[in-house]
Image: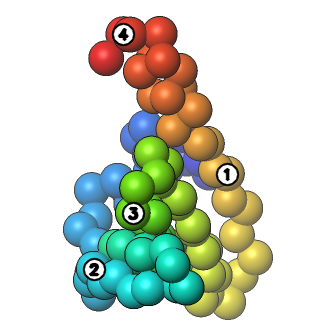
């Protein structure tokens, strides 16, 4: 609950499909990068208006992914945001063989 509103595990944004989704790739010197980018907007009338832009990228031949998030407050009020990075739990479970 937040200000009397039930938000669920990940807020309303967990059920909103991303828009402006695209994938691309390019050479950076000798490295080839691929990425996917998309935007999710969470807004209410007379309330928050927040956009999350997420870019997930990987370098060819490297066993890592990189996640870059940009959060924009497009509303008229200051919004308090909380970010819980659950990816660490998933990685820990994979390393421990639980997945």
Measured as percent of width and height from the top left, residue 43 is found at: 44, 77
User: On the rendered structure, is 15 left or right of 40?
Assistant: left
Residue 36 image point, x, y percent: 34, 73
**Residue under numbered circle 3:** 60
Q: Mark 2 falls on what kind of element?
A: strand
State the CA–CA distance, disc 1 to disc 4: 27 Å
99 is higher (above) or lower (below) than 82: above
Q: CA distance from mark 4 to mark 3?
A: 27 Å
**CA–CA distance in space, label 1 to label 3:** 32 Å
Q: CA distance from mark 3 to mark 2?
A: 15 Å
In percent of width and height, residue 93 lies at 45, 17
**Element class at badge 1:** loop
Circles 2 and 4: CB atoms closer than 8 Å:
no
Q: Which residue is mark 4?
A: 98
Disc 4 or disc 3, which is closer to the eye? 3
Q: Say which of 22 and 62 sits in front.
A: 62
Q: Position of residue 4 (x, y in %)?
A: 55, 47
N-terminal-most mark, 4 or 3: 3
Quadrant of the rendering where the N terminus is positioned: top right
Q: Secondary structure at mark 3?
A: loop
Q: Are marks 4 and 3 in contact (CB under 8 Å)?
A: no
Decide which of tag 1 and tag 3 comes sooner along the chain. Answer: 3
The answer to whether 18 appears left or right of 46 in the picture is left
Look at mark 2 in the image and give the residue it sits on.
23
Q: Earlier in the sequence, mark 1 or mark 4?
A: 1
Task: Depth check: give the residue in front, 73 or 76.
Answer: 73
Judge by depth and name the residue closer to the eye, 21 or 42: 21
């Amino acid at each position: 609950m937040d200000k009397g509103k039930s938000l669920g595990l990940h807020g309303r944004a967990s059920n909103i499909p991303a828009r402006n989704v695209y994938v691309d790739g390019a050479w950076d010197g000798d490295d080839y990068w691929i990425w996917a980018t998309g935007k999710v907007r969470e807004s209410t009338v007379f309330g928050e208006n927040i956009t999350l832009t997420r870019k997930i990228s990987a370098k060819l031949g490297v066993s890592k992914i990189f996640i870059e998030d940009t959060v924009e407050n497009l509303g008229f009020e200051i919004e308090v945001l909380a970010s819980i990075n659950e990816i660490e739990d998933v990685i820990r479970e994979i390393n421990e063989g639980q997945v």
